[in-house]
Image (cartoon, coloured by chain):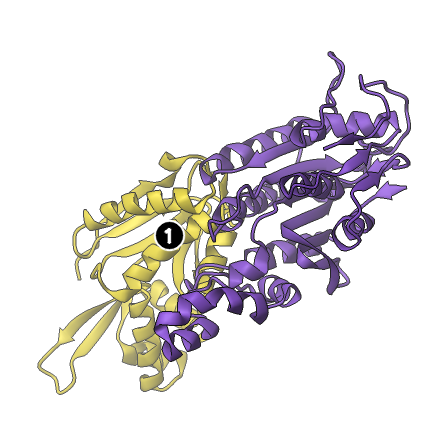
Chain colours: A yellow, B purple
Amino acid sequence: MKAMKATTFEISQFGRRLGTRLEGAAARRVLLAALDDLPPDGQLVLSLRGIDVLSGSFADEAIGKICQLLSSGIHGDRTLVVASPSADLVEDLSDKLAQRKLALLCRVGGTKGAWRVLGSLARPLVDTLELLNERGSATTKELAETLAILPNACHNRVRRLVRLRLVREEKIDVAAPHTQYRFHAIVE
Amino acid sequence: MRLTSETIEDVLDLVFVHAERSIDLRDVRSIDVYALLLLDLVVRHARESGAPLRVTWPESPSVRRWMTAMHFFVDVKAGLAPRPGSQPTTLMPIVSIDREEDVSRLVGSFDARLSDRYPMDESPRRRFLRILLELFQNIPQHANATGDVLDPHGIAAMHDDGHSVVLAIADKGIGLARSLRLRPGSSEQADLAQADPEQASLKQTSLEQTSLSDADALRAVVFDGRSRFRDPGRGHELERIFRLVRSWEGTVVVRSGSALLFQSEAGGDVVDVAPFPGVQIALSIPRAVFGIGEAAFGEGGVEPRGDPGFNEGDEGNDV
């Protein structure tokens, strides 16, 4: 699978203090336009650099609702990740995503920072996601072997991660009795 | 006599339960910021209801100076003004919150006042600003969601009492119970619409009056994170804010309609109070949270140091 194209969007263009739903809704319209401009498998990196405060209301309107749209599939294989200079900046965003039962990958602390999951993701799904992110790509069978779980259980976990746009799937053998997939991390 | 979140209830009881038209505050030696905002709304509500109150203001010069510095008399249009040259010493005087477009600017002014006075730690400062953003925008978003309130009069102020930074936000809008009854697709409304769609909207008013108590609404919002919107991203703000304040070993007071909740680290529950429109909230956050040490004394209305900050006598006036 070819490398996806990542485009960074600086959310500070809406101000340093991002607070109200009204402002969040206006930002969402711009973010959706940026998402639509991406190639079909593109990735939007939402940078929080330069932000002083990100409230839950703004975060929900601008980011939570976009995650909802992404998980519905109407934006195809496009993905969204967040890059935040600090963990406390994304606390309310994480709470709002959890309310929506959604999740998002966030890199905290600069380009060499660690990736963490914001929102709501059960521990087994986090384990599967972390394993896939570590490997870069794998089949369900390979993941199941490493995690020591049943392939069907692993398949269900990965399908959920695909729906949340936290990993990508690639059809690798459509001639087989059941279509085979390979799953790819969306972050490096 | 101290006018606090507890004793201000005596004033509301007099006015709204016993229909008293005069309030005697002469002996008040201190007022907390929550009580001040509630007093502001009580005076306004009475005036707008066509039965203005006759208030005898506190005799203590320091209390009156502080009330002036808080812009109280300007906000209630009481006709009392400070002498030229008297300097406000309060952390943040009363400001109006009308439009959502103004919320970020107002939060910025609170941030500036707090940061100018204290070298705060960044993390709690950011969390505090997020609290301000959520509570302030609640007023334009919810206080007049029915569109039938002439003036919800959203106001906020901030005060340092020497131990804690106290934030108060208040309005006299529709309150939590009426707000929750607007929730689309609620079981009550759905049942009604299914049974008799044509009458559903007509019956809504009577349903509103009987179906959800103020205490139930307060519990639903604070403990269960309920909102008038079905959108799963809505709600839970007060729940989260109050949890955060309690984790700071602070206290929370929230009042709506005839219900009041006091919460501290040890917990708390809802009690019945005199009915009054809108939502009024006080958050008391220990100064230590912001990296500020304890002060020798508070800034407002505590110490009776004579300061003739007024050009009015002690006579009561109709407001």
Against B214, is B26 above or below? above
Which chain is disc 1 placed on? A
Does dot 1 land on a helix, a strand or a loop?
helix
User: Where is mark 1, residue-wise?
Assistant: A63
Residue A35 as seen in the image, left or right of residue A23: left
Against B306, is A30 above or below? below
Q: Is residue B114 visible?
A: no
Residue at the location (91% across, 36% down)? B27
Residue A12 in the image: x percent, y percent? 39, 37
Residue A38 in the image: x percent, y percent? 19, 49
Q: Amino acid at mark 1?
A: Ile
Q: Is residue B318 visible?
A: yes
**Can you tell which quarter of the image residue A121 is in?**
bottom left
Residue at the location (43% across, 50% down)? A59
Observer-nearest of B254 and A93: B254
Using a 10 Å C-alpha cutoff, classify the residue at mark 1 as few (fewer than 14 neighbours), some (14 to 19) or many (20 or more). many
Residue at the location (36% across, 47% down)? A25
